[in-house]
Image (tube, grey):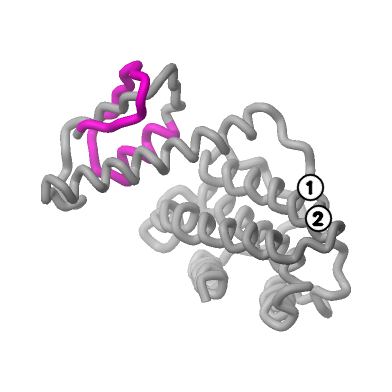
Amino acid sequence: LILWNVYNFFVTFANVDTWKIQKNYASSKNVLDRWILARLNLLVAAITTRLDRYDIYSSTSEIELFVSDLSTWYIRRSRNRVGPTARNVEDKSVFHATCYQVLTTLSRLLAPFMPFVSDSIYKNLTSEESVHLSDWPKATKLNKSDLQLIEDMKLVRKVCELGLAERKKANIKVRQSLRKLVLRAKGQVLSDDLLQLIKDELNVKEVSINDAKELSVVL
C-alpha cells in the first residue's frame, strides 16, 4: 500500500506537470535526489547479493526499509517541488526523472516477490510488455561523497526526530516557527542543503552545531 501510494503520487503529479519521459537526464543537484539514488544503488547491490545466497527473508526486510525511506522522507520532503505552485521547472523535471528511475528499478527488484503489483507498475510506467522480461538491475559503485551523504542523512533524520520530540515535550506545534536549533554532536559538519532540510522539517530559522560528546538538540 505504501509503495502504491508513492506510485500514485508520482503518476498524479507527472500528469499535472505534463512531464514526459526522456532518454537522457541531467544529474540532479538536489540533495534528496542524490540521496535516494545512492540508497537505491545500495539496495540493488544488497538484494542481488542476498538472492544469490537464496536469502529471501533479509531481502524483503531491506526492500521494506527502502520503501519506508522513499515514502516518509523522500516523497514527503519533496511534495513542494511539484504541482502548479512549484515554480522551478528544472527541479520539477529532475524530481520526476528521479522518481521514475526509482520506481522502475524497484519494480524489477520486486518482481520475484510481488509479481503482479511490480508488473502493473512497471508496464504502466514504461509501456513495455512485462517487468518479468526486463533485465535485472545492476548497481554502480558509489563514490565517497555519496556514501557520506547516506550517513549524513541518517544524522539529519535523527536530529529531526529529536527536535520533534522536544517540540512535543514543550507542547509547541510544528506550525509555530522557532528562532533556532542547536545541534550538539561530536565533530559533525553538515552541508547547507542538509541544514535546510532540518530547518524545513522542524520549522526553525537557524541551525548551529556545537561540539559535544553525545548527540542532542536544544530548541
In the orientation shown, which residue stands out farthest toward the bottom? 116
The quarter of the picture where residue 146 lies is top right
The answer to whether 96 appears left or right of 25 in the picture is left
Rendered location of residue 86, percent (x, y): 40, 54
Element carrying mark 2: helix
Rendered location of residue 57, percent (x, y): 69, 65
Look at the image and give the residue range highlighted in magenta: 193-218
Q: What residue does disc 1 label?
A: 139
Rendered location of residue 178, percent (x, y): 16, 38
Q: How many marks?
A: 2
Rendered location of residue 101, percent (x, y): 68, 57
Q: Which mark is residue 48?
A: 2
The answer to whether 206 appears left or right of 12 in the picture is left
Report the amino acid beneath label 2.
Thr
Q: Quadrant of the C terminus?
A: top left
Q: Nearer the viewer, residue 141 or 62?
A: 62
The quarter of the picture where residue 10 lies is bottom right
Instruction: Verify whether residue 202 appears in magenta.
Output: yes
Report the amino acid beneath label 1.
Ala
The correct choice, above or below, for 135 with respect to 114 in the image is above
Q: Residue at x 74, y 51 (%)?
A: 46
Q: Which mark is first along the chain, 1 or 2?
A: 2
Q: Which mark is residue 156?
A: none
Q: Residue at x 67, y 43 (%)?
A: 26
Q: Residue at x 87, y 63 (%)?
A: 135
Q: Residue at x 54, y 35 (%)?
A: 151
Element carrying mark 1: loop
Q: Give the Cα distance between marks 2 and 1.
A: 9 Å
